[in-house]
Amino acid sequence: MQMCWKQEWAAAIGDIQDAIEHIDIAQGKLERRYEKNLDALAHKSGRHFDKWATRTIMKQIQTNKEGIAHCKVAKLLLKERQDHIYQMILEFGITNRGEDNRRLAVLLHGYKPGE
């Protein structure tokens, strides 16, 4: 099936939405790892203090914090791109963009403008 250029833009928005969802998953994994490292740090710096393990854990905590921050920035940038492409659709494109346009809804993969 061949799509028109307007639908290609909608498909691009949907692909970006999929990327945002994957970044959300990665961010969740980094946050869980960050929490585990905080628990390990509390354990290692307690009664059984281990200077080297503490340094290693602190380095991992810092890496996880940076990864979480990068995920947030990446999601914001991708959402801006989605909004830009959606404005292109509104300006140049799809005349049948009502709520009953099922093809458009499928291509957008759950993207909601302005979120």
Image: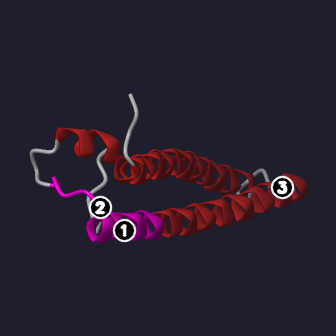
Asked if 22 appears above or below 93 in the picture, the reply is: above
Between the residue at mark 2 and the residue at mark 3, the CA separation in whole angstroms equals: 54 Å
Q: Which residues are magenta?
A: 79-97
Q: Which residue does the image show at 67% across and 51% down from the upper left?
A: 43
Numbered badge on residue 27 = none
Q: Position of residue 85 (x, y in %)?
A: 41, 64
In this rendering, position of residue 86 left or right of residue 54: left
Between the residue at mark 2 and the residue at mark 1, the CA separation in whole angstroms equals: 7 Å
Task: Tell me if mark 1 has few (under 14), some (14-19) or many (20+) residues whose alpha carbon lies within 10 angstroms of its own.
Answer: some
Name the dominant secondary structure of the magenta segment. helix
Q: Nearest to the eye among marks 2 and 1: give it.
A: 2
Q: Which residue is mark 3?
A: 56
Mark 1 or mark 3: name the one nearer the start of the chain. Answer: 3
Q: Position of residue 58 (x, y in %)?
A: 76, 62
Magenta-span inclusion, residue 13 = no
Furthest residue toward right: 52
Q: Which residue is mark 1?
A: 88
Numbered badge on residue 93 = 2
